[in-house]
């Protein structure tokens, strides 16, 4: 049976969005990325910009707990240990991911969708990555950033991905086993990477 949902996680500069759109077009699937944030924002009654910022930024209580957890206190005082938190907006993003997947025939880009969808039937979880050097070179070649800014953007994005997985899902280290397919665009062209995903989705 072919896959009805493809979740694509990607490192910045690895070509993930281009691959995802290509895969969606070939399979006749919807391509969903920012729609996740927009629908979560609608459920929360806030603007998409506010929801997007909330997705990127740890909630205030989480930042306070992290600070308190690294601050010396009197033995008699009770300070809760830093913990993974799931405020409403985080739960809403996951809810929208699940609702989107339930509709089927969709490529879901980013938002760590592969994690909550693990174990679901007819779901193919993909990670598209590459070395920091090649990803920075791809960004610089696109003309949006010079070499120095491209390298910084890749490093910053990689750190944010780590924080995101930890904050939303308590994952301290991203593992190959979180995905069904890993594609390295250092050695695979974007079209070949799309070929692999399409073949896997069809069960070829």
Image: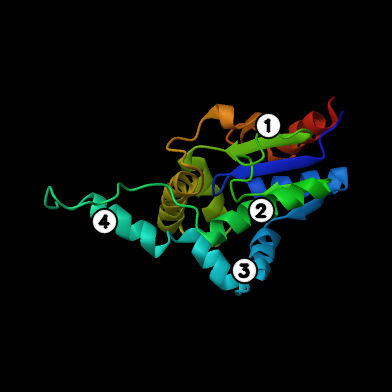
Q: Quadrant of the C terminus?
A: top right
Q: What is the secondary structure assignment of the residue under circle 4?
A: helix
Gap between marks 4 and 3 measured at Cα: 28 Å
Q: Position of residue 126 (x, y in %)?
A: 66, 36
Dot 2 or dot 1, earlier in sequence: 2
The residue that mark 1 highlights is: 119
Q: In terms of sequence position, does the residue under pointer 1 or pointer 3 come before the other?
A: 3
Q: Is residue 25 visible?
A: yes
10 Å crowding of disc 1: few (<14), some (14-19), many (20+): few
Would you call the spot at circle 2 few (<14 residues within 10 Å), some (14-19), or many (20 or more)? some
The disc, 4 or 2, on the residue closer to the chain's N-terminal end is 4
| Labels 4 and 1: the sequence-earlier one | 4
Compute the Cα span from label 2 to label 1: 16 Å
Query: Label 3: how many residues lie within 10 Å, few (<14), some (14-19) or many (20+)?
Result: some
Q: Residue at x 52, y 45 (%)?
A: 135
3D distance between C-alphas at marks 4 and 2 = 29 Å
Q: Residue at x 64, y 62 (%)?
A: 37
Given residues 183 and 52, the one toward you in this image is 52
Can you tell which quarter of the image residue 197 is in? top right
């Amino acid at each position: 049976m072919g896959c009805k949902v493809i979740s694509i996680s990607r490192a910045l500069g690895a070509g993930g969005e281009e691959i995802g759109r290509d895969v969606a077009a070939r399979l006749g699937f919807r391509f969903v990325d920012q729609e996740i944030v927009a629908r979560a924002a609608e459920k929360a009654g806030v603007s998409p910009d506010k929801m997007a910022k909330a997705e990127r930024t740890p909630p205030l209580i989480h930042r306070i707990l992290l600070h308190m957890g690294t601050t010396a206190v009197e033995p008699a005082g009770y300070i809760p240990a830093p913990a993974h938190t799931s405020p409403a907006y985080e739960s809403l993003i996951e809810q929208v991911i699940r609702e989107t997947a339930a509709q089927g025939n969709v490529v879901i880009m980013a938002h760590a969708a592969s994690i909550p969808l693990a174990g679901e039937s007819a779901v193919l979880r993909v990670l598209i990555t590459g070395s920091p050097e090649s990803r920075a070179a791809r960004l610089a070649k696109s003309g949006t950033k010079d070499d120095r800014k491209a390298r910084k953007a890749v490093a910053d994005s990689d750190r944010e991905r780590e924080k995101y997985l930890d904050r939303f899902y308590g994952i301290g280290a991203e593992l190959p086993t979180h995905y069904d397919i890993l594609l390295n665009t250092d050695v695979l062209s974007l079209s070949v990477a799309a070929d692999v995903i399409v073949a896997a989705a069809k069960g070829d």
